[in-house]
Image: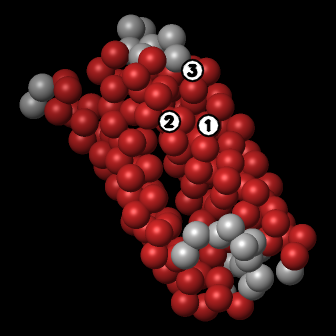
Amino acid sequence: MTLKIIQGLYSFILVFITFLISKHFTDIGLENFYETINVSDITPENNYFRYIWKALYILLFLSFFTILVSKKSVEQFDDANALFIFQLFLQILWTFSFFYMGQLLASSIVIVLLVIEAFLMIYVFYPINKWAVLMVFPYLIWIMFASYLNIYIVFIN
């Protein structure tokens, strides 16, 4: 296998596993918890979330793959890899705490950390590949919006 194929598989597997785990927690929460809480008037309908998240996961995969094939040093890889994996971990933790556990305050803290982590990814990715950074921006914008929705839910419920 060539190095690019291995990098592509690595990127895809990380994102796909995150997608599957997050989808599992979200589906459980949508069935058992989410419909019982008050949400903001600007909250999109549930079926839109699936499309948005699929697009965002594709962009995250492409962004990280671009970083892997563009890196210039081991240090750049280590930093980018650590930040990307931690961001995926926070994504899983947020869906677990919000949808699966229904812990609104805890999930608000996690999603704010997720926003900070996305900014850190942009900071670390920028010197490596600017196109990869552009692919992270929709994710950042979406999780900032999701942060607002999550914090709104904490205060209204």
| Residue 7 in view in this figure | yes
| Above or below, 79 relative to 54 | above
Q: CA distance from mark 2 to mark 1?
A: 8 Å
Residue visible at 75% across and 85% down in the picture: 37
Q: Are marks 1 and 3 in contact (CB under 8 Å)?
A: no
Residue visible at 40% across and 63% down in the picture: 51
Select label 3 or label 2 by which is in front. Answer: 2
Q: CA distance from mark 1 to mark 3?
A: 10 Å
Q: Position of residue 4 (x, y in %)?
A: 20, 26
| Residue 107 in view in this figure | no
Q: Residues within 10 Å of mark 2 (few under 14, many from 20)?
A: many
The local secondary structure at tag 1 comes to: helix
Select label 2 or label 1 by which is in front. Answer: 2
Kind of residue at badge 1: Ala
Q: Residues within 10 Å of mark 3 (few under 14, many from 20)?
A: some
Task: Farthest residue to the top: give it.
Answer: 72
Residue on which disc 2 sits:
136
Residue on which disc 1 sits:
118
Query: Which of marks 2 and 3 precedes in the sequence?
Result: 3
Task: Farthest residue to the left: give it.
Answer: 1
The local secondary structure at tag 3 comes to: helix
Kind of residue at badge 3: Val
Q: Are marks 3 and 2 in contact (CB under 8 Å)?
A: no
Q: Are marks 2 and 1 in contact (CB under 8 Å)?
A: yes
Residue on which disc 3 sits:
124
